[in-house]
Amino acid sequence: MLERLLPVLLLTGSNVFMTFAWYGHLRYRHVALPLVILTSWGIAFFEYCLMVPANRMGAAVYSAPQLKGMQEVITLLVFACFSALYLGQPLKWNHWAGFALIVAAAWLIFLD
């Protein structure tokens, strides 16, 4: 059970860091771009510290395509929360519909 759950938890944590690295600076558009890039790299380091072990451990119970599909769904969920709560930009119906199609694609990856 833990071998199936731990990769999901690590992927979730890594996606929180990734989302802040990629989109967190949008609240600080006045900050110089070189500083934003360096800050994003620093945040991304922690993303990799979780993502690499998640994939390494996850490969013992999931295929690489399953890990990637799972990561995409987690990314969408983390981003939806981030967009609404941190950026103040809640998703609209069409965003949710598009995300639902990606979730459906990930679900197909898990079928035997």
Image (cartoon, rainbow, N blue to C red):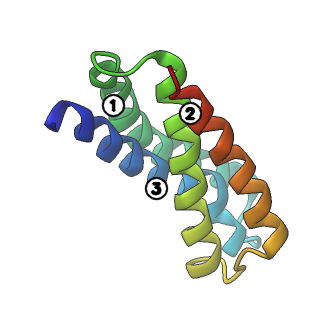
Q: Is residue 48 visible?
A: yes
Cα separation between marks 2 and 3: 17 Å
Q: Which residue is mark 2?
A: 69
Q: Which residue is mark 3?
A: 16
Furthest-front residue in this view: 112
Q: Residue at x 50, y 19 (%)?
A: 112
Q: Please tell me how crowded label 3 is: few (under 14), some (14-19), or many (20+) other residues with Cα within 10 Å.
A: many
Q: Residue at x 48, y 17 (%)?
A: 64
- What residue is at 61 percent from the left and 31 percent from the top? 108
Q: Residue 109 bears which disc, if any?
A: none
Query: Does the image show residue 39?
Result: no
Provide residue 82's location: percent of width, then percent of height: 57, 69
- For label 2, the SS is helix
What is the x, y in percent for residue 25? 65, 64
First of labels 1, 3 by sequence position: 3
Q: Residue at 53%, 26% (x, y): give it.
A: 111
Mark closer to the observer (2, 3): 2
Disc nearer the start of the sequence (2/3) = 3
The crowding category of the residue bearing disc 2, from other C-alpha atoms within 10 Å (few below 14, some 14 to 19, many at least 20), is many
| Residue 73 % position (x, y) | 56, 47
Q: Amino acid at mark 3?
A: Val
**Real-space Cα distance between discs 1 and 3?**
14 Å
Residue 96 lies, with reference to residue 85, above or below; the image says above
Which amino acid does the dot numbered 1 rest on?
Answer: Ala
Label 1 sits on residue: 54
Q: Label 1's element?
A: helix
Give the CA distance from mark 2 to mark 1.
14 Å
Q: Which numbered disc flags the more N-terminal residue, 2 or 1?
A: 1
